[in-house]
């Protein structure tokens, strides 16, 4: 939930997310990958050009929370 809240209003890099949430970078990468695989994020930037990507939550917070609940508890 911390990560979704952090990226709800504006796109952020993995490093920014980790810094703002106090979640280790390795954990942020893992969680972001889960979100990406379940179409929960908007991806900004291009890793080939800019060497980084920015992530922003996709859709409204309640819908994403419900999707996470279903993903992990079903």
Image (cartoon, grey):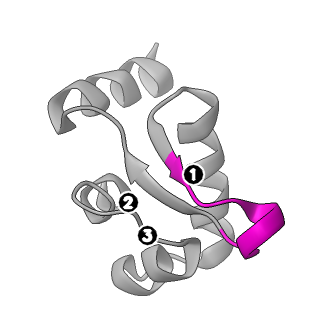
Q: Earlier in the sequence, mark 1 or mark 2?
A: 2
| Pointer 3 local density, CA inside 10 Å: few below 14, some 14–19, many at least 20 | some
Which residue in the protein does label 2 denote?
3
Image coordinates of residue 30 in percent, x first then y, are: 66, 54
Residue contact at pointers 1 and 2, CB within 8 angstroms: yes
Q: Residue at x 35, y 82 (%)?
A: 20
Image coordinates of residue 28 in percent, x first then y, are: 57, 64
Measured Cα–Cα span from mark 3 to mark 2: 10 Å
Which residue in the protein does label 3 denote?
12
Measured Cα–Cα span from mark 3 to mark 1: 14 Å
Q: Which mark is nearer the camera, 3 or 2?
A: 3
**Which of these two is toward me, 10 or 6?**
10
Helix, strand or loop at label 3? It is loop
Q: Which of marks 3 and 2 is nearer the N terminus?
A: 2
Magenta segment range?
A: 43-52
Side (left or right) of 67 relative to 45: left
**Which of these two is toward me, 36 or 65?**
36
Q: Does the magenta stretch include residue 42?
A: no
Measured Cα–Cα span from mark 1 to mark 2: 8 Å
Which residue in the protein does label 1 denote?
31
Helix, strand or loop at label 2? It is helix
Side (left or right) of 48 relative to 68: right
Q: Which mark is nearer the camera, 3 or 1?
A: 3
């Amino acid at each position: 939930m911390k990560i979704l809240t952090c990226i709800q209003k504006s796109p952020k890099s993995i490093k920014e997310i980790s810094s703002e949430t106090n979640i280790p970078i390795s954990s942020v990468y893992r969680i972001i990958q889960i979100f990406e695989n379940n179409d929960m994020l908007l991806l900004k930037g291009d890793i080939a050009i800019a060497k980084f990507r920015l992530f922003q939550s996709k859709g409204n917070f309640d819908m994403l929370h419900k999707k996470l609940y279903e993903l992990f508890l079903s």
